[in-house]
Image (cartoon, coloured by chain):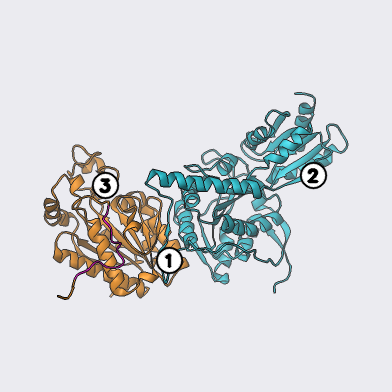
Chain colours: A orange, B cyan
Amino acid sequence: MPRTYARPKTLFDTSTHYCAGCGHGIAHRLLAEVIEERGIRDRTIGVAPVGCAVIAYDYLDVDMSEAAHGRTPAVATGIKRAMPDRFVFSYQGDGDLAAIGTAEIIHAANRGEHITVIFMNNTVYGMTQGQMAPTTLVGQVTTTTPRGRDPAREGGPIRVCELLAVLDGAVFLARGALSSPRNVREAKRYLHRAFDTQEEKRGFSLVELLSPCPTYWRKEPVEAVKHIDEVLVKVFPTGIIKDWS
Amino acid sequence: MATEERLLITGNEAAAEAAIRAGCRYYYGYPITPQNELTAYMAEHMPEAGGVFIQAESELAAINMVFGTAATGQRAMTSSSSPGISLKQEGISYLAGAELPCVIINVMRGGPGLGGIAPAQSDYFQAVKGGGHGDYHIIVLAPYTVQEIVDLTQEAFDLADLYRTPVLILIDGQLGQMMEPVVFRPRQPPSLPPKDWALTGAAGRPRRVVRSFFIRDPDLVAHNEHLQAKFRDVEKNLVRYAETNADEAEVLLVAYGTAARVCLEAIREAGSQRPRLGLLRPITLWPFPTAVIRQRAAQGKLFLAVEMCAGQMVEDVRLAVEGRSRVGFCGQVGCGTPETERILAAAKTLWDGG
């Protein structure tokens, strides 16, 4: 029988440190598939964040750098400016990108840096045991919002794509959901489009991925993906938010 | 082939021009006084050299842009002044941990906090003792003329590549702002190790990772042992200093940067008076010229550290002397330089046994 589905070579043949039901594994695989389908493994340089994906380079077989917490877009800028014909992606979680790294992401987008950002939004800090993220939903219980996030006290969840959409340099912004085969395939289309954006030197591109965190949502994996489709998408609408065409 | 070129230029501009001539093609900076001439010079001239200039959104972003470019093996630089250098310390720790070469210039002003914009030397501790978190040192060079800013800035890029480390050039605001004639000479780039760690896209080779993160304890221990071995190597091979009247001196002034210039004037004013004065001027602040100070202490010389701060380098002088001789201090706190009269008086007091 012909084999129609195999591990992309850009993904190391190893198990990950991610929790059961976590979305990072899916996102890594999508990224690896996109890199492989485009034939750019040898021309790609990635930047890993501080957060759950801190050792993303243990799974992705491309040249990679780490970055200090939140400084990921600045490191990616330094790489891309020195290597303008390479594909440069950064991979960031919601704390890295939308809290400590808010300035870096806004200014990299505003400069129209020709980089692609994969933004994992799981509404919580996973690596440090489940604190409130900038994207935490109103009412969501975390270790630092034990009575639920109160917008009067902590503000509301930040919609990153919509925030960046007002900047001229940000030319492709899309939000996908890692919640069903169909949504995963759609997310992959966004990733390809983001890499098209970089290839054509159109400007800054970012794909936000709503990603399950069963561990810190205190849900079974199946319940967690349902939570994305039933709850998260109402706060973070999926689809292409901005495109250059 | 370029020939010698003479310019009348400020220290800040000299550092920028020297960096470009040393092959630096990436400069990332953020405005802060008293180093703005450097950033402006880079904005003007880096594009002419085919390089990249970015005014970053913060010092944090600037040093991390340096990190990214350094990770590709290209020569990158940033500059700032004291409060901005504090912000860069996180990035400098990461650069040291990931062993990425780059050059950082600190045109020091007074502190703490926002302090002021007048020249000072109060960032010595931060510069030579690590500055950021973790066990590390970076090479720290201390020029005392605009010509030496030129020479050391150019060499800093070679040292950074040779030892895979950030190199910090410590200049005070006075040196940064003053104009002096300088000569740019054609340089023969030294033989340096290949950058077989640089991220360039893994074409035809296994992929590479630039990291300072080692989650398994034995890996972190091994990485730190490797770093420490490198630091010992730098201490063994890189120490530099200049001496004036050191053999004849009864009191050796120890000073760097602008303070060293004031010391030279004090020595001239002292003439043949007792105590006879000399100068020991560290050119590398890290590694510190410990051995020569110890040797001079064994010859019975007294030491007077002269600094534009409340006394920071003096601690390293005392550590070098280890009680073999007496060590005094003459400084100017806040900002500015100690006057020669005060230096002469302090040397006399030390000589008299005070």
Asked if disc 1 and disc 2 are in contact, CB closer than 8 Å, the reply is no
Q: Which of the 4 image quadrants contains residue B328?
A: top right
How far from the left and from the top, in percent, is residue A73? 38, 58
Q: Residue B322 versus residue A123: which sits nearer the camera?
A: B322
- A185 to the left or right of A88: left
Placement of A158 over or under B51, stated as above or below: above
User: Badge 3: few (under 14), some or many (20 or more) residues near its Cα, within 10 Å?
Assistant: many
Placement of B267 over or under A240, stated as above or below: above
Residues drawn in magenta: A5-16
Whether residue A243 is visible to the viewer of this picture, yes or no, is: no
Marks 2 and 3, Cα distance to the nearest angstrom?
60 Å
- B284 to the left or right of B53: right
Q: Residue A41 versus residue A141: which sits nearer the camera?
A: A41
Q: Which of the 4 image quadrants contains residue B264?
A: top right
- Quarter the C terminus of chain B occupies: top right
How far from the left and from the top, in percent, is residue A217? 18, 46
**Residue tagged by mark 1?**
A80
What chain is tagged by disc 3?
A
Q: Residue A168 versus residue A228: which sits nearer the camera?
A: A228
What chain is tagged by disc 1?
A
**Tag 1 secondary structure:** helix
Q: Residue B230 versus residue A212: which sits nearer the camera?
A: B230
Q: Which mark is residue A126?
A: 3
**Mark 1 is on which residue type?**
Lys
- B268 to the left or right of B242: right
